Amino acid sequence: MNFAEQGFTLLRDLLSHDELDLARTLADATISRYRSRETSVVSGSVSIADVTRQHPARNPDIRAEAFGNEPFIIGDILSLEPCFSLLLRKPEIWTNAADLLGYPMGEVVLHMSNITRKPAGIGPAIGWHRDCTNTYFASDDERTIRMLLPLQEMSSRNGGTAVLSGSHLHMESTPQDLSAAICPVVSPGSALVIDSKVLHGGTPNRSELDRDVIILQFGVRSSPLRHRAEECLSLCGLDEVVRFAGSL
């Protein structure tokens, strides 16, 4: 799979079984804290109710008011649960990010982290978009990637991320025909990595399977930033993450 040509790739078995178990444990605990309405978790997050009210067509037949305590996006997870850094310090995450960005590992930095969810039966669609246009954390030169680490198998069945291959090479237009989009099957512990310029989206999850994904955005240290959020370990490299994790 050629990342430069297609704008996405799969990294199989990036996390070990033990690391995947830890990721699930930390994610489940963070999700439970949201459901308990812990202020620090809720304040930087988006609920299923929020996204359903804002985009009702993306979550048809779902009553928004019933799901105010169910998280859709939980932001800045390293601040909420520093033990996520025990996963982020894994060198293979960074060597792959460096390879795909085309820069030495010392030039690669973390931008942001979150958990994005499509709970079984009620998960909303995600509209087609390019991450480089976001107003949360973005670089002027668009030298960024996102690494999606699903905690359950991710596929079209449970609203997995679909990608329009090669669309990052045609920024001047937005294709109207999305029938050629690919929705890769990504096993738990593997990663789907997408170029920030590639078009991607996903259908609602009406299956009996949850779809919880840890998302990490990486960029290049020298890139000028158009938007910058203040997150735990943002603009830090591997060495700084290792030191942070070692202090826990």
Image (cartoon, rainbow, N blue to C red):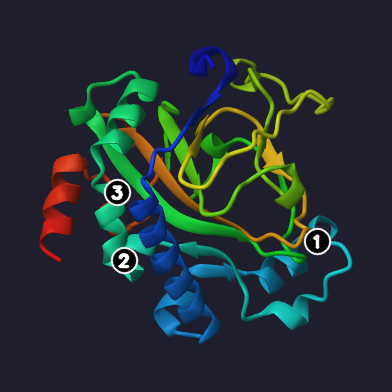
Vertical position of residue 10 compared to residue 103: above or below: below
- The residue lying toward the viewer, choosing from 106 and 86, is 86
Q: Residue at x 41, y 42 (%)?
A: 217
Q: Is residue 4 visible?
A: yes
Residue type at mark 1? Asn
Residue 56 is left or right of residue 18, and the answer is right
> Disc 1, disc 3: CB below 8 Å?
no
* Residue 38 image position (x, y, % from top left): 45, 84
SS for dot 3: helix
Mark 2 highlights which residue?
Answer: 79
Vertical position of residue 101 compared to residue 126: above or below: above
**N-terminal-most mark, 3 or 2:** 2
Mark 3 highlights which residue?
Answer: 88
Q: Residue at x 47, y 70 (%)?
A: 28
Residue type at mark 2? Ser
Mark 1 highlights which residue?
Answer: 59
Between circles 1 and 3, the one closer to the viewer is: 3
Between circles 3 and 2, the one closer to the viewer is: 3
Q: Residue furthest right?
A: 61
Q: Residue at x 35, y 34 (%)?
A: 219
